[in-house]
Image: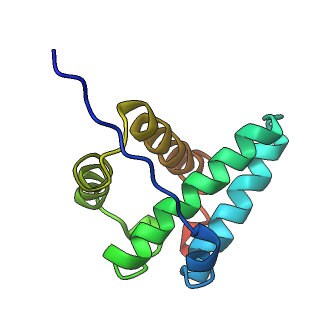
């Protein structure tokens, strides 16, 4: 079995974060407050926040900075394609990023469903 080559990337997500849709930033802030309330470790919280910054940087660059609730399934499929084929991330890293965004989607569906139109 051929061993997959893993590429390592460095990102400056903080710089790009300044240009992310303000509604998405507000959503991430509220989600991070929720994560803190669920007693996650500081490392987990930092990882979630970094992963969401990377995701919304991609949304800003590739999906015209749409609000999270406006994204379609095909947008998420395109993002996964980007992670695997363009960025060549390891399967473990892809799962970690996908899990974080999935958790945000579940938060929106279960906690904010009646409030999303306010953003």
The residue under the point 63% across, 82% down is: 18
Q: Is residue 80 above or below residue 27?
A: above
Q: Residue furthest left?
A: 1
The residue under the point 82% across, 45% down is: 36
Q: Is residue 119 visible?
A: no
Q: x, y percentage for residue 92?
A: 43, 31
Q: x, y percentage for residue 11?
A: 53, 63
The residue under the point 64% across, 47% down is: 48
Quadrant of image for the N terminus: top left
The residue under the point 54% across, 73% down is: 117
**Total tally of numbered discs in the picture:** 0
Closer-to-camera residue (13/97): 13
Q: Is residue 9 visible?
A: yes
Left-right relation of 39 to 48: right
Q: x, y percentage for residue 71?
A: 36, 65
Closer-to-camera residue (43/1): 1
Q: Is residue 91 above or below residue 101?
A: above
Closer-to-camera residue (14/80): 14
Give the image's coloring scheme: rainbow
In which quarter of the view is residue 32 placed?
A: bottom right
Q: x, y percentage for residue 119?
A: 60, 77
Q: Is residue 82 above or below residue 119?
A: above
Left-right relation of 50 to 82: right
């Amino acid at each position: 079995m051929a061993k997959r080559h893993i590429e390592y990337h460095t990102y400056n997500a903080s710089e790009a974060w300044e240009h992310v849709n303000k509604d998405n930033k507000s959503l991430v802030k509220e989600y991070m407050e929720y994560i803190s309330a669920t007693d996650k470790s500081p490392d987990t919280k930092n990882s979630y926040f970094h992963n969401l910054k990377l995701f919304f940087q991609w949304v800003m660059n590739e999906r015209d900075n749409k609000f999270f609730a406006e994204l379609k399934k095909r947008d998420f499929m395109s993002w996964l394609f980007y992670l695997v084929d363009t960025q060549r991330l390891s399967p473990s890293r892809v799962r970690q990023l996908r899990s974080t965004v999935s958790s945000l989607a579940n938060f929106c569906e279960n906690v904010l469903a009646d409030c999303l139109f306010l953003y």
